[in-house]
Amino acid sequence: MSDKSDLLLLLLYLSGKVRGKTRLFKMVYIAQEELKRTVARARTTTVPLDYYVFYAHHYGAYSKEMESDLHELENQGFAERELSTSSSFEVNTYSLTPRGIRKVRDSRLPKEAIAAVGYVVGKYRDIPLTWLLREVYNKYPGFLGSEPSDRNPQDLVPAGARACACSV
């Protein structure tokens, strides 16, 4: 488990629960980007600049290291995953265990990290996943994903749905 996992733990702590691995990965990615912008604007060096490396994958930004840390957090009893079946697919919901909650409460995370993650949780935890993906694809087009290669962010909003007025 890396020090980077502190951001992942904080996101799970502030979220309570995150439904779906795709949502979790996108939220951590956006939180990192928000934190990078905050650090650049403030020209501060108090926030560690060690971030997960993300690359374009099936549904946008993905990190193998974050995947590994997530499994390790589960194996060490800091996080848990609940599998549920919804119509024709399975969804994992991630949350912290009491041990994970204590770890976050005992940590000394920089206020900039707490603010960036809090912003992301408040804005993206409960919006439809298709809208979250659209936000990531529009804001970070390099993460449009690798399958299908012709994916258009406009296609991710269900027909008849109101487009999300959110921006990253």
Image (tube, rainbow, N blue to C red):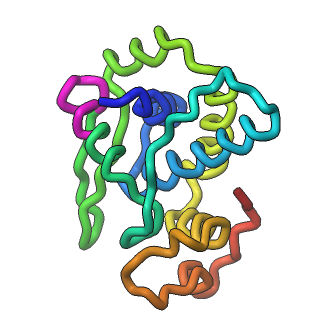
Q: x, y (%) of residue 159?
A: 58, 87
Residue 88 falls in image quadrant: bottom left
Residue at image point 31% right, 16% down: 99
Image: 17 above or below 158 = above
Count of marks, rendered view: 0
Query: In which quadrant of the rendered image does the C terminus lie?
Result: bottom right
> Which image quadrant for residue 52?
top left
Determine whether 148 is above or below 94 in the image: below
Residue 158 drawn at (x, y percent) = 55, 81
Image location of residue 61, percent across then percent down? 46, 61
Compared across the picture, whether 162 is left or right of 78 comes to right
Q: Is residue 124 left or right of residue 66?
A: right
Q: In this image, 16 relative to 122: left or right?
A: left
Question: Residue at the bottom extreme?
Answer: 150
The residue under the point 41% across, 19% down is 101
In the image, is residue 2 above or below residue 81? above
Q: Nearer the viewer, residue 153 or 128?
A: 153
In the displayed orientation, state which residue is furthest to the left.
75
Quarter of the view holding residue 108 = top right
Q: Is residue 152 magenta?
A: no
The location of residue 91, given as percent across then percent down, is 29, 57
| Residue displayed at 45% across by 27% down | 6
Residue that protrudes farthest toward the top in the picture: 106
77 falls in the magenta region: yes
Query: For the N terminus, which image quadrant?
Result: top left
Residue visible at 51% across and 69% down?
A: 143
In this rendered view, identify the residue nearer to me: 55 or 122: 55
Magenta range is 71-79
Q: Is residue 65 left or right of residue 50?
A: left
